[in-house]
Amino acid sequence: MSDHPDLPPDAPAEASAPDEEGRRCGFVALVGAPNAGKSTLLNALVGTKVSIVSRKVQTTRVPVRGIAMVGKSQIVFIDTPGIFAPRRRLDRAMVGAATGAAADADVAALLIDAVKGIDDSLDRLISVLKPLATTRILILNKVDKIKKDALLGLAAAVNEKLAFERTFMISALKGSGVDDLKTWLAASLPAGPWHYPEDEITDATERSTAAEITREKIYEYLHEELPYQTTVETTAWEEKTDGSVRIEQIVFVERDSQRRIVLGEGGRAVKQISMTSRKELAKLFGRPVHLFIHVKVAEGWENNPEHYREMGLEFPRE
């Protein structure tokens, strides 16, 4: 077990030999409670923003893949929705997507907020990971805010509940320990060809990325005024002859009162959201973006299978 983020861990002895070209490739699912820091960690591991980040809980709704290269190893990280006790249909779809991603991965990485320590969510997470045949590792996040003795005690307590192959101590926000984690994973993955081109950082489409960035800006601007069930869909995408792109999006809310919140007095809120989203998208895509946002009331949209298909989630029938 690595007990300090500055101490590089050794690669596992059981790692298979690389293929003839020395390549390795595999999937690593980042699993944890909502707001454990999975999206921040994914962005740190990839080296750029591929997953939206918000103070609002349950921001990540679908597994987001971020791709990192370490030597001849291609690591496909999967930022999964937080695992919690689901109450609504959307909750069940998100938790189902997270558990499915963990089961299919080569490595399931349990991320725990070290500041919060062990809470009621841990038993739920353990119950998801325990039956999996995949390699399990433990990642304690925000270690810069906790004394070393407390961290070692926390690591021991979690490993008593479920044995992990390795324990890593990191700060996703500051980047401490992230390179050691990547190095160990790169040596642990199965031998084989890469699944993606060497320069690719995510498999998300530009349309879905645009919708997610706008949803992030809605949360940033409106904070707790709006329920997390709000969703954004990219409905039109037009490549212009001058190299720019024209994007149309719909923000779906459940009630007219929520629509008024998103619009704001005199449309000021939606204009601010559109401006900040457009600027980030232009920077992300490397070209001018013309963004047009419409706000629509869709009562009970959580019960519409089409919205789930648009988000990339399976629609829970029960």
Image (cartoon, grey):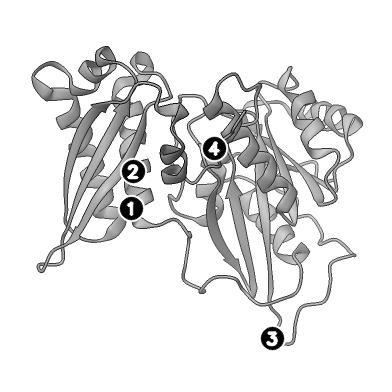
Q: Is residue 165 at all visible to an observer of this figure? A: yes
Residue pointed to by mark 3: 21
Q: Position of residue 282 (x, y in %)?
A: 23, 53
| Disc on the earlier residue, 2 or 3 | 3
Q: Are marks 4 and 2 in contact (CB under 8 Å)?
A: no
Q: In this view of the protein, which residue sits in the foreground, 93 or 136?
A: 93
> Residue shown at 19%/37% (left/top)?
293
- In primary-sequence order, the first of circles 4 and 2 is 2
Identify the element where label 2 is drawn.
helix
Q: Nearer the viewer, mark 4 or mark 2?
A: 4
What amino acid is labelled 4 in the image?
Answer: Phe
Q: Secondary structure at mark 3?
A: loop
Q: Does residue 157 lie above or below 43 as drawn?
A: above
Residue plotted at (51% across, 74% down): 197
Task: From the image, state whether disc 4 or disc 3 is nearer to you.
Answer: 4
First in sequence: mark 4 vs mark 3: 3
Q: Residues within 10 Å of mark 1 (few under 14, many from 20)?
A: some
Q: Which residue is mark 4?
A: 315
Cβ–Cβ under 8 Å for marks 3 and 1: no
Q: Quadrant of the N terminus?
A: top right
Residue that badge 2 annotates: 211
Residue at the far top: name it.
257
In primary-sequence order, the first of circles 3 and 1 is 3
Distance from disc 3 to disc 1, alpha carbons, whole Å, reads 35 Å
- Look at label 1 and name its amino acid: Arg
